[in-house]
């Protein structure tokens, strides 16, 4: 049972009403359903009318949010309480978006002043690189930026750089290296040139094995190809909280852009981890990205639950995850520029809420974070949408689309919009057996074949979707969209009683990998289970 037993029981009994209730009927009975179950903030319209809900559902879900004291919890986060209890840290990514004239004192320090001081340093560097004033060792301007980082030090910057390509300074080429697979950096090293490349080593801790290995490889490549130690400062900068490790690596701390332990890795694109974003779109547009996120922060903290975008999305996720047994949620951006959005949200959501222990150390008694996955539309339609429409599991989805294209071309945008909207209609309506039979009869299909064929053409429908639509995918809107998902994850974490800001689950694999690495390097397997030994031995003999 959840920590909110009364609200939970009320939702459980209410859910039974929906066992036989089809969304088709809900729409037929209520022409005002779209107006009642859609809301707008920060230029984003959320249509949540294609959900298995009625007014009572929203009231009961809002009561659950009330019982979990979502507003109070959010205020505690925003003001800098140490809500990340297992790491004894504040969680203050929202402070990274506060305007310069705001102030927020945490432990006697004005974090807004700190944030803006580093932002100014980062912005000044950005301008020098973008206008060609910052030169490589041979006097050439920078043409290639290589961000070396992983997880939050890669996914956010990469996703945003891709999403905001229309604002990219096109004479700069951006490369992102994350995987420890040597192929990743090798392919980048093939297309850059040593004299005009800037490496950004992005790592909060500056201890992450993949990032340090890639950074050392890049450094060695630089030294092997004409660069020398004195030139490193022109070509390597670091973004980190760990200045000791940065100077140990050989990067001058004058070329380090810092941030703070109260910025979680997956919440860090707003900090100097976003240096590659600044370099791509410029400081003014980066400020617009921050402004969009800040406006969403205000919406989240001020708006009532039933009109609050992140709260509504979170509560609907809880409704399906905990009362309909939904374990998988699709992100379907109908926007090619958002092709890394689902990958970014996977870390944000699954690293935050993929947990089975509550803040107080007790077991979580209800299902927590779902599997998040997705691909841009329309591609997904020709791959996995079959299962969304006719699979045995109920899977929910967010459809995300801009009304206006950044690249208007013939009928493309109308076709994109038509497909996006049609998918939500099809998932909601479905197709009955009678409709399928009538279609086959009208198509003059042999009547003997109709009974079996019609069964294959039935769509149960009643499959819930949210649609997020906005005018254009600009920096402000993207900032708001990302912040909306951050707060959705926060609300769900609070309802499930989790600490959404640690990530102990990635530690065991890291520790075991270093044991196995030592064994692979020494040439013999240590003590493991038979499978692990078998795989180590296979790898050893293939590399002999
Ligand atoms: O291993 C997971 C993780 O700690 C993520 O939370 C983080 O975003 C990523 O590794 C990278 O960490 P860092 O920025 O310290 O290199």
Image (cartoon, rainbow, N blue to C red):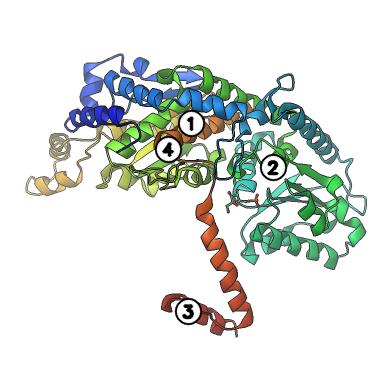
- C-alpha distance separating marks 1 and 4: 32 Å
Circle 3: element type: helix
Of residues 71 and 32, the one nearer the viewer is: 71
- Ranked by sequence position, the earlier of labels 3 and 2 is 2
Residues tagged 4 and 2 counted as in contact (Cβ below 8 A): no
The percent position of residue 198, horizontal first and vertical second, equals 80, 50
Point 71% across, 22% down: residue: 103
User: How dense is the environment of label 1, judged by Cα within 10 Å: few (below 14), some, or many (20 and up)?
Assistant: many
- C-alpha distance separating marks 4 and 3: 39 Å
Q: Which residue is mark 4?
A: 497
**Quarter of the image containing the N terminus?**
top left
Q: Which residue is mark 1?
A: 401
Q: Which residue is mark 2?
A: 273
Q: Report the side of 540 relative to 167 (left or right).
A: left
Q: Which residue is mark 3?
A: 533
- Ranked by sequence position, the earlier of labels 4 and 3 is 4
Point 50% across, 54% down: residue: 505
The picture quadrant where one finds residue 432 is top left
Circle 4: element type: loop
- Ranked by sequence position, the earlier of labels 3 and 1 is 1
Residues tagged 1 and 2 counted as in contact (Cβ below 8 A): no
- Ranked by sequence position, the earlier of labels 1 and 4 is 1
- Ranked by sequence position, the earlier of labels 4 and 2 is 2
- C-alpha distance separating marks 1 and 2: 27 Å
Q: Report the side of 516 relative to 52 (left or right).
A: right
- C-alpha distance separating marks 3 and 2: 39 Å
Q: Report the side of 191 relative to 22 (left or right).
A: right
Q: Is residue 505 visible?
A: yes
The percent position of residue 68, horizontal first and vertical second, equals 41, 28
Q: Residue furthest left?
A: 448
């Amino acid at each position: 049972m959840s920590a909110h037993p009364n609200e939970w029981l009320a939702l459980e009994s209410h859910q039974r009403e929906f066992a036989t209730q089809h969304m088709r009927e809900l729409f037929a009975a209520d022409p005002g359903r779209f107006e009642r179950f859609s809301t707008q903030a920060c230029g984003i319209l959320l249509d949540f009318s294609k959900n298995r809900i009625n007014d009572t559902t929203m009231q009961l879900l809002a009561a659950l949010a009330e019982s979990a004291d979502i507003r109070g919890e959010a205020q505690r986060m925003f003001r800098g309480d140490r809500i990340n209890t297992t790491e004894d840290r504040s969680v203050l990514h929202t402070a990274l978006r506060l305007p310069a004239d705001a102030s927020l004192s945490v432990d006697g320090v004005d974090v807004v002043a700190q944030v803006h001081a580093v932002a100014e340093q980062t912005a000044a560097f950005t301008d020098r690189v973008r206008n060609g004033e910052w030169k490589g060792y041979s006097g050439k301007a920078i043409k290639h930026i290589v961000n070396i980082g992983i997880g939050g030090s890669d996914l956010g910057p990469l996703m945003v750089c891709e999403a905001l390509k229309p604002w990219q300074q096109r004479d700069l080429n951006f490369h992102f290296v994350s995987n420890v697979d040597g192929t990743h950096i090798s392919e980048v090293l093939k297309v850059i040139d040593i004299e005009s490349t800037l490496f950004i080593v992005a790592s909060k801790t500056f201890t992450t094995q993949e990032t340090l290995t890639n950074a050392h490889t890049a450094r060695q490549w630089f030294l092997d190809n004409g660069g020398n130690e004195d030139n490193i400062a022109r070509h390597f900068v670091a973004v980190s909280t760990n200045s000791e490790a940065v100077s140990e690596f050989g990067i001058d701390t004058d070329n380090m852009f810092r941030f703070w332990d109260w910025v979680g890795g997956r919440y860090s694109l707003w900090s100097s981890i976003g240096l590659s974003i600044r370099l791509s779109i410029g400081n003014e547009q980066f400020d617009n990205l921050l402004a969009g996120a800040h406006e969403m922060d205000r919406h989240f903290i001020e708006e009532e639950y039933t009109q609050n975008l992140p709260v509504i999305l979170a509560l609907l996720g809880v409704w399906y995850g905990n009362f309909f047994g939904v374990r998988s949620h699709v992100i379907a951006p109908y926007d090619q520029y958002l092709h890394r959005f689902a990958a970014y949200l996977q870390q944000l959501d699954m690293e935050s809420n993929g947990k089975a222990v509550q803040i107080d150390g007790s077991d979580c008694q209800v299902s927590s974070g779902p599997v998040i996955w997705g691909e841009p539309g329309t591609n997904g339609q020709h791959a996995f949408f079959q299962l969304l429409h006719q699979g045995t599991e109920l899977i929910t989805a967010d459809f995300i689309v801009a009304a206006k294209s950044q690249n208007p071309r013939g009928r493309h945008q109308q076709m994109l919009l038509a497909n996006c909207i049609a998918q939500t209609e099809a998932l909601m309506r479905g197709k009955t057996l009678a409709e399928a039979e009538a279609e086959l009869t009208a198509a003059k299909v042999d009547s003997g074949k109709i009974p079996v064929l019609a069964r294959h053409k039935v769509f149960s429908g009643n499959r819930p979707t949210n649609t997020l639509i906005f005018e254009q995918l600009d920096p402000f809107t993207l900032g708001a969209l990302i912040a909306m998902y951050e707060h959705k994850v926060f609300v769900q974490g609070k309802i499930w009683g989790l600490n959404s800001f640690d990530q102990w689950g990635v530690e065991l694999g890291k520790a075991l990998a270093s044991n196995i690495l030592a064994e692979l390097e020494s040439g013999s397997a240590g003590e493991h289970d038979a499978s692990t030994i078998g795989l180590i031995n296979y790898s050893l003999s293939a590399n002999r």
